[in-house]
Image (cartoon, rainbow, N blue to C red):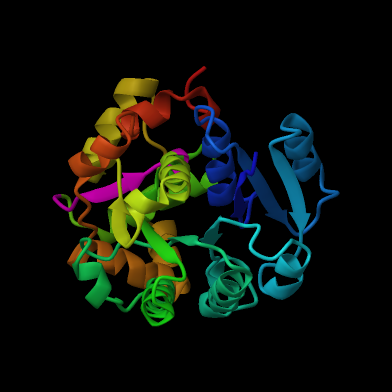
Amino acid sequence: MASNTILVIGATGQQGGAVVKALLELPTQTPPLRILALTRNAQADRAKKLAESHKGVLELVEGDSSKPKPIFNSLPKGSVNSIFIVTTPAMGGSKLTEEEQALPLVDAAVEHGVKHIVFSSVERGGDERSWENPTSVPHFLAKHNIEIYLRDKAEKEQGKFTWTILRPVAFLENFKPGMFCAVFTAMWASALSAETKLQLISVRDIGKFGAIALTEPAKWSKKAVGLAGDELTLDEARAKFGSVTGKKLPQAWGIFGKAMLWAIKEVGTMFQFFEDEGYHVDIEARRRDVPDLQNFAAWLKAPSNGWTN
């Protein structure tokens, strides 16, 4: 029986890894799933462990997503049905812009014969407003440009492929135990007024939406949706954190939060967006797609996130 072959970019990274995990947790599919996990180094311990744990379902593909032609040339033409694409902002260590990462990959995928492309972007004020609101945040703008390119290319190709755009909000993983949690809270306290709510999503749930969109392309074709599981003021976040963990939400001194917002201009601009415009995901609509969508309390209770055992 022919398989439904899905290529996941960044399969050993945060979002790509969550998509792989969610795909592996799906009920048995017809035709059966074949997951191609792209990694820069197939000999890395994390990559080898992933492949060894899921023999027969998951295969490693070694390659550089910024140079996509060799990746697709190593596979029989038309053999990949769907692809999940995630890009990394330059401030996250990438040497390439997000457009330079994504656009050649989109072109190579379409040339190969991929029928459905799922792109992980960012929410910018609502499902409709996000199309017209690139914002002044550089990495938001880059993702907006990729969205437009993907949408317009599909229109020009006249049915050659379909697309889904997922637009996550701020990650709940910013609250993982460690120094960054304390600094993130300090930035929130410094940049946002007491009544401003911040929407949050778990990486686990981004993975779940990715898996659904990849395996149900007809249902998710031409959908661009924001992803969020909770919406909180900082005081509400502190209260929930205390209720679940019995501890105080870590927060660095205010001067550290202000210093980060000043020193990393893009982060400062992003927090200004949170204050001035903010995310506007219809959380209840998303919960109809994923009923166990995690809110802050549920995320904190998950043992893998380090706050409860």
Quadrant containing the N terminus is top right
Camera-side residue: 186 or 124? 124
Identify the residue at image location x=19%, y=48%. Answer: 282
Residue 139, position in %: x, y? 44, 72
Q: Is residue 150 above or below residue 286?
A: below
Residue lying at 69% horizontally and 55% vertically, measured from the top left: 38
Looking at this rendering, what residue extends furthest in the right direction? 43
Residue located 59% across and 74% down the image: 101
Farthest residue to the bottom: give it.
Answer: 156
Could you say where residue 162 lies in the image, as x and y percent from the top left?
A: 41, 64
> Residue 63, relative to residue 44: is it above or below?
below
Q: Nearer the viewer, residue 213 or 145?
A: 213
Residue lying at the far front of the rendered structure: 1
| Extent of the magenta region | 195-204
Q: Residue at x 20, y 43 (%)?
A: 285
Q: Is residue 85 magenta?
A: no
User: Is residue 219 in view from this perspective?
Assistant: yes
Q: Residue furthest top?
A: 309
* x, y percent for residue 44: 82, 48
Left or right: 98 with respect to 294?
right
